[in-house]
Image (cartoon, grey):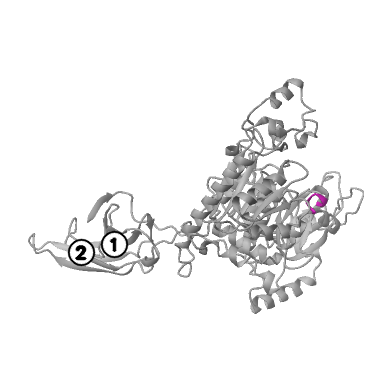
Amino acid sequence: MISSRRGIAGCFFLAIVALWLATDRGSDGDDDEASKRQQNEAASSLSPNDVVARGSSVFCQGDSARTRSCRFKNLCYWPSNDEFLFFHGPETAIDGLPTQRFDPAFLDLSSVSDHNTQHFEYTDLPASTLRPRPRTKEKEFEESFRVGAYERGRHVVFNRFNPGNFMHVLHDDLLPIYFTLRQNQLIDCLTTGCKYRLVAVDRHNDDDGSAYIDLYQLLVPFDDGILTRKDLIQLGGGGGGGDAGSNLVCFEDAIVGLSKLSTWYQYGFHEPQGAIPDTHATGNLLRQFVAFFKERLGVVESTASSNRYLFPKDNIKPGSIVLLSRSMNRIILNENELSASVSTKMETSVNVLSVETTSLRDQIVAVANASILIGMHGSSLALALFLGEGSALVELFPYAVPASEYQPYKTLTGLPGMNVAYQSWENECEENTITHPDYPSAYGGLGHLSDVERDEIMTSRRVRRHLCCENPEWLYRIYQDTFVDISSVLTVVKRAWQGAIHIQDNLKTIDRTVTSVGPWQKIFPSKLRNVTCVVVRSKDDGGGIGLRLTWMPSWNRAYIAGEVWYEVWIQEEGKESYDAYKLQATEYTFFDNIRRGTSYIVWVRSVIGNLEGPFSGSLQCRT
């Protein structure tokens, strides 16, 4: 079978994408180490001001603030102004900057895109401002800067988005930092001994994130591997009493712009919250982070949990079930009854796990070895990231909070390759809820509203769609406490487990000893080899001239599912148009539009399913 089309697009074009090349590979080898030592020894004879006065440099990749990341040399932070400075000097080099750096922003300091508190900018200055000079009336605003600390080595500069919230810590910080480290070949430093630091320049009070600061420490190779804004103020000479420090803190090598490879959810800053439509996150990627994270925590997964998909088909009982318990807000008021009923119905143990008193490590251990995780909507359900394949998540929602509008965890479990079943339950009975209109407004209180506004919210039966983050109707409803309807919850739990069994059955059909490639990954056909061209004469039309083309199939064909086709382009030399053909054979003779004494250029590629491989190199044929 063969099909043909006439091309008018001009001669064949191949695009080669230029890859930004890092200027320093860190500690990848002995030669690199020796070279770096020599550089450091030469620089050590210079003062920090003299080193930075050589000039700052920046190399960027990405075509927008959302996708851009940059690597800086001699990037400086000015604590007293909370501002980054870039010094133009004799050794300055710049590549990859947008023409309009401030339209609307240069790049994001956080993995949360397009948030006006997360943008990164720097101020340009001549390196001469690092030299001391007298002030004059004509230049009364001219500064003379002093480098108080010159931090050598590699640094990742970022903002913690919300370090007091477990979901935000995982989704917005730890996962993006992990993949940023991998993209910059730094993650291996945790085992090879090379060093880098994380630099969190956000204004969050460190006490607010104290419950999770140890999690960030898991991502660095040594104990003092994290610098916060408070540390930068001290390095800049600042002390107590609000003194932010007037000296600069400069970084020899700084990466700015976290990877967004692993993010899957947006929180509703510009439109109501929902899944990121073009996310690249997959279960395969997230489980790479999970394996790394559990290793750093010293968490060992049980054999039964890690081989859940190998369970015999008649084993329909789940292993342990984890029920997340909250005592501060969003309380399940009949938690004991629910736990006992689930245990009886599912014929297994239920581990009631307090999110306030159980260590995070123990929470992760319990969830990683669980068959089903049950909990009220909230950041603790980010623990679902640690569920094994073939398990299930049951998410409970208070009265008037529609599950269809708040789906970070449904989106997580539904990512390609996550292989976790999901079901939600909503409280549909207003009598089974206890509200707290007298709470502070941040926790759903309504005391700051007018009588009309309070009545409207308290009588509403469904939270209306809204933007983040202080919608009073949303806060009022999400901080309710709930008497769950045991019977309907049991039905949902049973349905979730049936979904998990279905996933387990599917996983049994995958031969994981052959390949680790999942349906979320794409293997493209290889370039065709041994493409040949032979001039032949037709026996049927008076000796017409034809081109017989042959080639070898894609050598990785065995690893790709789908029907195989070959696309052939034939262009007469000197012309813009070309003939294109689609066929299934690896050998064919073309007579149409082939003329004697003419040169032709030929390209061939493989198409398997809907995946197109690269064209072969151009082949010249002369009749």
Residue at 28% over, 62% down = 601
| Count of numbered marks | 2
Q: Is residue 174 left or right of residue 512?
A: right
Residue 576 part of the magenta-drawn span: no
- Kindly identify the amino acid type of the residue bearing the numbered disc 1: Val
Residue at 88% over, 54% down = 238
Foreground: 386 or 311? 311
Q: Secondary structure at mark 2?
A: strand
Question: Which stretch appears magenta?
Answer: 206-210
Foreground: 447 or 122? 447
Residue 335 position, x and y percent, is 71, 45
Residue at 89% over, 48% down = 242
Residue 268 vs 157, above or below: the answer is above
Q: Can you tell which quarter of the image residue 338 is in?
A: top right
Which mark is drawn over residue 602? 1
Within 10 Å of disc 1 (Cα), the crowding (few <14, some 14-19, many 20+) is many
Residue at the spot of label 2: 547
